[in-house]
Image: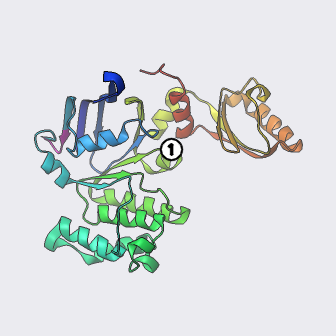
Amino acid sequence: MILDVNGMTKVFPGPDKTKIKANDRLTFHIKEGEIFGLLGHNGAGKTTIVNQIIGLLTPDEGEVTLLGKSVQESPTRARSLCSVQPQSQVPLGFLTPAQAVTLMGKMRAGKRFDPKRMEMLFESLDMGEWINKEGQKLSGGVRRLTAFCMGVISPGKLVILDEPTNDVDPVRRRYLWQVIRELTNDGTSVILVTHNVVEAEKAVDRIAILDKGKFLVQGTPSEIKSSISNLMRMEITLNREFTDSELPNWVHLSHRKGSQLLFSIHPNSAPLAINWAGEQVDKGLVADYSLSPTTIEDVYIELTSRKGQVQ
């Protein structure tokens, strides 16, 4: 086992002498060669978990063990075993991606730094046109890819990626996921910290959904999807606003994202849903629609909408 976290609790002072539990008795384990997705909205407690794993914060309760040794007792060792891409952008200044990645590679690997690995990363991510361009002239997406390369040029046994695809274009996102998966070929483990539920479902081996400092559920994507219900999802693109009263009574849970309306239905209601959606298209109220199996995003929405019902 690469990482064992047992009962991790971290409390911060709040306003008016209150206390805020950023992490509340969290327990999870990460195996060798596994990609573990840590999902949650901003402020759910994800970054606090990361900071305790690498020894920047000490848990108020619980134990964090990395490769068999306590992180609390040896925080410097923990940081030497982990590679981290932070959520914030890395300030490159006048450094080019090639210079920044070379510098980090030499800091991490010393004489074992291999320039060919850097070339492989740049080629895999299709970054060739930017590698010798000054950082201040690069787009946010290219700087994000550069930060990723800096994090994995000499990867530790545990690689922690905090929102690695932010600002990255769709084509290079696909390349990035391929490189992340290839990291695990030699037994390296990855923690993917994200609020992008759709991408995470395709990329990870196991997932934990975090809300208000607590895990709502954890397991493989298929286990998590089957844990709530055997529902299907319908997604429609609206030409105008819908009120909840206009939705049929067979709709279980609805969620809006701009002009997109997502809702869950029982499989027995699928014919009704298709007929209803077709009628809305004919009326000009809906631009298009799709019906598909439940996704992790549906589970995430359902669990986090239960307002304290999940313990």
- In the image: residue 267, left or right of residue 57: right
Q: How many marks?
A: 1
- In the image: residue 255, left or right of residue 309: right
Q: Nearer the viewer, residue 118 or 59?
A: 59
Which of the 4 image quarters holds residue 259? Answer: top right
Q: Is residue 115 magenta?
A: no
Residue at position x 73%, y 33% in the image: 270
Image location of residue 290, percent across then percent down: 71, 44
Q: Up-down: is 159 above or below 236?
A: below
Residue at position x 50%, y 44% in the image: 197
Q: Is residue 1 visible?
A: no
**Amino acid type assigned to the residue bearing label 1 in the image:** Val
Q: Quadrant of the N terminus?
A: top left
Q: Up-down: is 172 above or below 232?
A: below
Which of the 4 image quarters holds residue 8? Answer: top left
Q: Nearer the viewer, residue 242 or 31?
A: 242
Image location of residue 212, percent across then percent down: 41, 29
Residue at the extreme front of the image, as rendered: 16
| Residues rendered magenta in the picture | 65-69
Q: Read off the residue under disc 1.
A: 197
Residue at position x 30%, y 22% in the image: 17
Q: Nearer the viewer, residue 232 or 96?
A: 96
Q: Up-down: is 266 above or below 90?
A: above
Q: Is residue 218 visible?
A: yes
Image location of residue 141, percent across then percent down: 47, 64
Task: Decide whether the magenta segment is chiefly helix, strand or loop.
Answer: strand
